[in-house]
Image (spheres, rainbow, N blue to C red):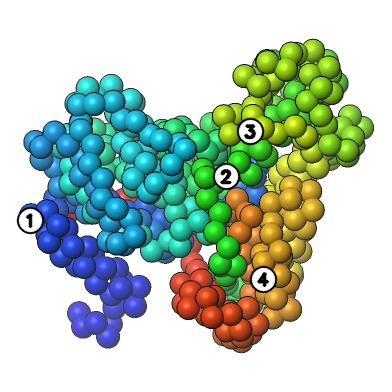
Amino acid sequence: MSNACLPIIFIFFMHRLKNLKDHFEAKFGESPLFYACAPGRVNLIGEHIDYCGYSVLPMAIEQNILAAVSVNNSGTIQLANTNPQYQDFKVSCSEDIVIDRENPQWYYYFLCGVKGIQEKFGIGCLAGMSCVVDGTIPPSSGLSSSSALVCCSGLLTMEANQKSLSKVDLAEICTKSERYIGTEGGGMDQSISFLAEKGTAKLIEFQPLRATDVKLPDGAVFVISNCCVEMNKAASSHYNIRVVECRIATKMLAQARGLDPSRLVKLFQVQTELKASLEEMLALVDEVLHPEPYSREEICKVLGITTEQMCTELLSANTQHVTNFKLHQRAKHVYGEAERVMRFKSVCDAGAAGSITLLGELMNQSHASCRDLYECSCPELDRLVDICLKSGAVGSRLTGAGWGGCAVSMVTSEKAAPFLRAVRDAYYTPDPRRAAMEKQSLFVTKPAGGAAILLEE
């Protein structure tokens, strides 16, 4: 088959694979044994609710982490990156893997995946490996570059050590192991990276973990646009503060309704125990939690715990400094966003006329809630979302953790080209730094497949 008959994306991937192989051979003097890849993701709706136990609705994107691997008896794991700004790293296979959460370098994310597989199987001495990593997911952009790296690492470590796990097990292991770097994620990123299928978004549900196809409406495309403000979840406390606030809100609501707060850590669990609807939970939040920030003293008094217990049982390592907690706003966002996810799926399933408009409205409501209640946006991201709406998007919202990173916009297919031009002219072209990043910052995306092992021919 001639190149003229091959899809451009496939040609790009094969070219990238060859470049990675060449880089590997130049670095290590041998050919790789196999390759592993894990995609990034864009969350269409359902922000900051996976760690509260609620379903989310992401899709994998074509940008991914790709690694070339050889297995040997060197007794070491040698890591290199095609991007020269990321330094090489080497670790002994016979020593305990130590991950420095105070210094979240790229190789520590890789080692999270290694450590997760090692602990799952109780492997005393891992197989020696040489790896070169290549990534096309913009870092710190809200598209899950870090989790994709952990997933890719976990997958290739399993393969190199001749072990076998289901995709669900791999997703759960990588979710737990990424916490070694200090991020208390809920599992969406790892789940979609492993469970994604080409051509469909997924409703990801937890407890137990499962994924359901969600057919997106014909006649619409999703466009990702990066505001070019980076936010590293592990390097800041913003993300974990929200996790802690939701954990405390869980216990306050449980206490108010006569439940045992010590047993409950997720807002979903309170709803389940009360057998309440999401609408009833939203009313309960208004009834029980006041909008003014809570102090440590007030929380301890309501829950009947000491300050020391609060520090050890409720706060994480990088949230020990926090003194005020916005419990009403955080819980209000979570229950409202959980409801929007289910409405989004219902609209997609129905496939009725006007579904694109309804989905766009839900996305807009989601962004407003993230901005005003969860306070996880930033001025640049808000401005970008506003530009996207004025440029013709039916709906637009931040995606990922926030505080920077990307927006995702739903655009009717016939307006995609003028939409891209308008956003480029309004947001990227006037700023030299953004203009230089525009090619990898503004693009149409399609649902991609999940993580996979590729054998060297």
What label does residue 29 carry, if any? Answer: 1
Q: Position of residue 97 (x, y in %)?
A: 31, 30
Asked if residue 34 can be seen in this view, the reply is: yes
Residue wearing tag 2: 236
Calculate the distance from the C-alpha at mark 4 to the C-alpha at mark 3.
Answer: 30 Å
Residue wearing tag 4: 384
- Check whether the beta carbons of the residues at disc 3 and disc 2 lie within 8 A of each other: no
Disc 4 on helix, strand or loop?
helix
Please give the name of the residue rendered at 64% of the width and 74% of the height, measured from the top-left corner: 411
- Check whether the beta carbons of the residues at disc 2 and disc 1 lie within 8 A of each other: no
Q: Is residue 20 left or right of residue 58?
A: left
How packed mark 3 is, by other alpha carbons closer than 10 Å (few <14, some 14-19, many 20 or more), is some
Asked if residue 213 can be seen in this view, the reply is: no
What label does residue 319 carry, if any? Answer: 3
- Check whether the beta carbons of the residues at disc 1 and disc 3 lie within 8 A of each other: no
Where is 415 relative to 97, above or below? below
